[in-house]
Amino acid sequence: MRLRIFSQVLYPLAGVLLIIAAWVLACWLLNIPTVVLPSPDKVLRALVVRSDLLLSEGWVTLRETLYGFVLAMLVGLPLAVAVANSRPLNLMFYPLLIALQSVPKVALAPMILVWLGTGLESKLALVWLVAFFPIIVDTAAGLRATPKELLELAQSLNASPLQIFLKVQLPAALPFVVTGAKVAITLAVIGAVIGEFVGSSEGLGFLLQSATSQLDTPLAFAALFALSVLGIFVYALVGLGERLMSSWLPPAPAHQ
Amino acid sequence: MAFGVIKHVRKVFQLEEIGWTAPEPVVALDDASFQFEEGELVALLGPSGCGKTTLLRIVGGLIAKSAGSVAIAGREVTKPMGDYGFVFQAPSLMPWRNVLDNVLFPMEILRKNDAAARRHAHELLELVGLSGFLSARPHQLSGGMQQRVALCRALVHRPRLLLMDEPFGALDELTRMEMNDLLLRIRHETKASVLFVTHSISEAVYLSDKVVIFSKRPARVVKEMAIPLAYPRSQKVRFTPAFTVAERIASEALGVVAPTADEAPAHAAQGAGRQ
């Protein structure tokens, strides 16, 4: 037990401290100007002094991320079901999906801003674009990976297509859906920040950019820190969802 | 008319059915004919990959036959009948359901998941010695226990016919013997009619009223033999001369041993021969 605390808490902590120490040392010894690389204490001060600003801007980014993610789930799940169950639909849309995925979303951002403006809508569109792909691909893979015997068992009992979907395919695909959601939520944060970079008047991405342009590097670093906290937070939310569904999920994941 | 009549069944898998690139359509089953009575346990014995499983799926209505006819209890089988039980080689339990809910799955699909169904599920699980594991998850059970759950799941809706596809093939020998005895006991209690696919000669002889022997693919029925051993059987029967003779006849039909010069005892133990 003691050993586990040691390895699970102390080692990562030691790693972080080591890097901070190297950072502090580099700032002092090499005399790096604050504009280029602020020392940790300046970043910490920015975090404390500007915490109200960081929280309000963080709230904006969090909302964009979560709304976009939910939207991606709402669109991605039914689409995955359609693609996995219908060969014509699969042939019609799967190549298109792959093509869409290979388009860099950053390149699309300016156009989306032209279409949807600088408000919430354009951020949602970008988050949706980056997040729905892993959801649809993993869910479709999960639906297709349903054990053949379970499908035959259901067929042998003359189960209806809806029964087969609800009682066999969906639960069998659930671990895959969770995996897709975990990838999607981390991408969703990136999508929101891209949207804010390209055109916005609020959010952590906007704050990061305006702080950099005003040479307020400590604030930029603080915003960066807030962004990573936000990323961890939303990932943990999905993890919590997984925990809540744990009675559904097999203990050992069927994939990886 | 017999309970089950299988007449000249042929199955050719077309290329689009197989899904992988084969040079030509695969003849899985050339010509299979045999009959069985209600309450009989019939083993379909043949080399691996010979098409016995294909025949079982055709009888179960899961795949269409290319030619011939299959009639069970007077009904021609063209689609799943809804009142057959299936046991596969792997237990194929649902990892997200506990033991009891796995067994009750057919009743849910048939919309008959009532108190009587739960009582029957409890009885079956009691019969296979798993009444202490109702709320366990499949991953907490051994392979043999999982297959016992699968057996209960196949029986819970009181199927007219139980189709078993090498159900004990993945188990170790001792567990397999135990499962064989369990199957015989369950068969005795439920009076179920069973088609049992296996590639184990001794398992086929030990379990069945009748063994139907298939050739290599494309499969034909090369021999039908009645097993002249009285039920209830116990493992001791494996060491009787009648058992050994039956095993030898089956081995000869399969071509794994050359026919013996002295045919007298073989013919004495042999049932309805074909061809």
Image: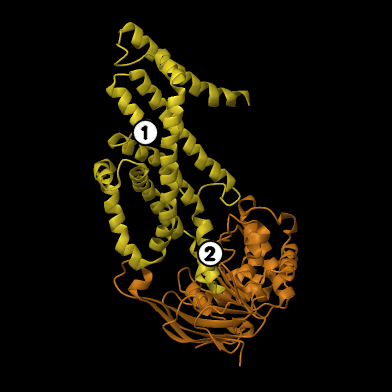
Label tally: 2
Task: Chain A: give its colour.
Answer: yellow
Q: Nearer the viewer, residue B89 or A253?
A: A253
In this image, A29 relative to B232: left or right? Answer: left
| SS under mark 2 | helix
Q: Give how far across and how far down residue B160 sits, in percent.
A: 64, 79
Task: Chain B: give its colour.
Answer: orange
Q: Is residue A183 above or below residue B117?
A: above
In this image, B199 relative to A121: left or right? Answer: right
* Callout 1 crowding tier (Cα within 10 Å): few <14, some 14–19, many ≥20: many
| SS under mark 1 | loop
The residue type indicated by label 2 comes to Leu
Q: Nearer the viewer, residue B41 or B83?
A: B83
Q: Quadrant of residue B92?
A: bottom right
User: What is the chain identity of the residue bearing mark 1?
Assistant: A
Q: Quadrant of residue B218?
A: bottom left
**How far is the residue under mark 2 from the one under mark 1?**
50 Å
Q: Nearer the viewer, residue B229 or A134?
A: A134
Q: Give how far across and how far down residue B42 sits, in percent.
A: 60, 78
- Say the numbered circle drawn on residue B19: none
The residue type indicated by label 1 comes to Glu
* Callout 2 crowding tier (Cα within 10 Å): few <14, some 14–19, many ≥20: some
User: What is the chain identity of the residue bearing mark 2?
Assistant: A
Q: Of circles 2 and 1, which is in front?
A: 1
Residue located beneath label 1 in the image = A202
Q: Give how far across and how far down residue B76 sits, in percent.
A: 53, 87
Residue sitting at 41 percent across and 54 percent down? A76
The answer to which of marks 2 and 1 sits earlier in the sequence is 2
Q: Is residue A136 above or below residue A198?
A: below
Which residue of the protein is positioned furthest toward the bottom in this rendering?
A: B1
